[in-house]
Amino acid sequence: MSRPQPLMIQIATGDARPIVKQIVDAVRLKIATGELLAGAQLPSVRGLAQQLTVNPNTVAKAYAELTAEGWLDARQGLGLYVATPRQRLSDGERERRLDDAIQRFVHEVAALDYPPQHALARLDDALRVLAPKKLA
Amino acid sequence: MNDSLFTPETPVIHTAGLCKRYGRKLALDHLDLQIPRGGVHAIVGANGAGKSTLFRVLLGFLPPSAGSATILGRDSARLRPQDRARIGFVNEEHTLPGWMTVAAVTAMQRHQYPGWRQPVFDEVIGHYHVQPAQKVSQLSRGERAGFNLALALAQTPELLVLDEPTLGLDVVAKRAFLESLLYSNAATDGRAACTVIYCSHQMEEIERVADNLIILERGRLKHMSAPDDFRARVTHWVADIPFKAPDPAQVPGLLEQQQLDGLHHYLVLDQDDSFGRFLRASGARSVQSMPVSLDRAVNSFLAQHHAAPIAA
C-alpha cells in the first residue's frame, strides 16, 4: 500500500480567492514545478480537509476540478494520483515551443546541405509515424 | 420514523410567514425559510437580526406570533421527547446545571438518549481538560462549550443546532470545536451525517466550514447560497473621477462607498461589466475592479441597512 505524498500547502481565509480556488492553484503549481511528480498519490479528501481545517466538501470540489482539468487521475478505490502530463499548455506556449523546435531543426539541417524537398520528405515520414498513435 | 411525514427530501427546517413580535418590534418578519437536509448551514446577520429568536421558536421554547415553523417535519410547538432526541442543541450560553458534576450530567444524557454513542463523547471531550468529578460551574467557558458539543454529538442527532458556539473560545478550543464538528460528525455506520445549523459572526470560520450561507436581516431572509456564490455577487470597484462623483442614490447595487486618496471606492451587489461603463459615463477617467473576500462581502451587505447614528 503506497502512502500519499504530503501536500505542503497553506490556505488563507479572508482572501479574495475562495478556498476551493486556493487549493486548486496550489496543487497545480506543485505539479507544474515538478514538486509533485506524475504518479504521486494525493492526500485523501478527509485527510487534507483536516490538515487545512476546512469542510471536506471544499476539498472534494477542488479535487473534482483538478481531475476534470486532467491534472489528477482517480484510480477506482485507491485514491487520486497526479496524472501523466497531457496537453496542458496554453495555445501561445505550444506555438512558442513549436517555433523553437522548428528553428533547432532548420539550423541542424542547413549545415547538412540536403535539398529542402529531401529534408521535408523525411520529416513528413517521421511525423506520419506519430499521427496514427495520436488518433487511436 | 413512520410517526412523522419526514423523508430525506423534507427540509429539516421549514418556516412559512413566521413572525415573532416582542412588543412593537418584529424579531421575525414573515420569514420563509427552507433548509435542506445534510451539510453545514451558517446563519449570519447583524445583532438583533432574529437568529436566536428563530432557534427558540424552532425548538418550541417560544410560541410564534404568526405563521408556521416545522423542524424535522414536526410542528415546532408540538415536539415530543422522541422528536427532541433527534435534535441536538448547543445554546449561546452553554447553559448546563452548574451544581451537577460532569459525570452526573453525562450519565443523565446517556440515560435519556437511546442513540447515545460513548466513543463520540470520549473523542470530543478528549480535546478539553474536563474531569468527570468537576462541577459544571467550575468549568471555563471553553470547557463548557466543548462539554456541551460532546453531549450534543454523542446523542447522535439528525440535526444539530448551534447558537454562536465558538464565541469567547480560545484559539485552541475553537479549532478543537471546529474539528469535532466537521470530522466527528462524518457519516458513519451507514447513517447519514447530521445536518448542522449554526449561527456565528466569525466569517473566517464560516468560510472554512459552511456549505450554505443564510443571511438574515431584521427577521427576514435576505440571501441563501453556497458562501462562494454569495462572495461572487459582490465586487469592489475603484474609479478615478476628477469632477463630481455620481449621486449615491443613482449608483446601481451600491453597498458601500468610500473616497480614499481622491479615488472613489465602491462595493456593489450583482453588477457586471456594465457597472464600469456606468462609472465611465459618470466621468471616471480610469476604472478597475476586483473580487472581495467573503468577510468583506458579508460585511458590506449587512452594513447597508445596519443601524447607524444619523449623520451630522
Image (spheres, coloured by chain):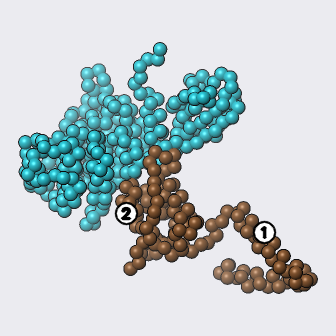
Chain colours: A brown, B cyan
Query: Picture coordinates of residue B51 (x, y %)?
Result: 31, 36
Q: Is residue B83 left or right of residue B39?
A: left
Residue B30 in view, yes or no: no
**Residue B245 falls in image quadrant:** top right
Say which amino acid is labelled 1. Answer: Asp
Secondary structure under tag 2 reads helix
The label on residue B42 is none
Q: Give the labeled residue for mark 1.
A: A99
Q: Is residue B269 left or right of residue B59?
A: right
Q: Earlier in the sequence, mark 2 or mark 1?
A: 2
Query: What's the chain of the residue with tag 1?
Result: A
Task: Give the crowd class for mark 1: few <14, some 14-19, many >=20 residues within 10 Å.
Answer: few
Query: Picture coordinates of residue B161 (x, y %)?
Result: 27, 46
State whether residue A5 is above or below residue B60.
Answer: below
The label on residue A46 is 2
Instruction: Measure the alpha-carbon separation of dots 2 and 1.
Output: 45 Å
State whether residue B150 is above or below residue A134.
Answer: above
Secondary structure under tag 1 reads helix
Residue B273 in view, yes or no: yes
Q: Residue at x 29, y 41 (%)?
A: B167
Residue that extends furthest to the front in the rendered view of this protein = A111
Same chain under badges 2 and 1? The reply is yes
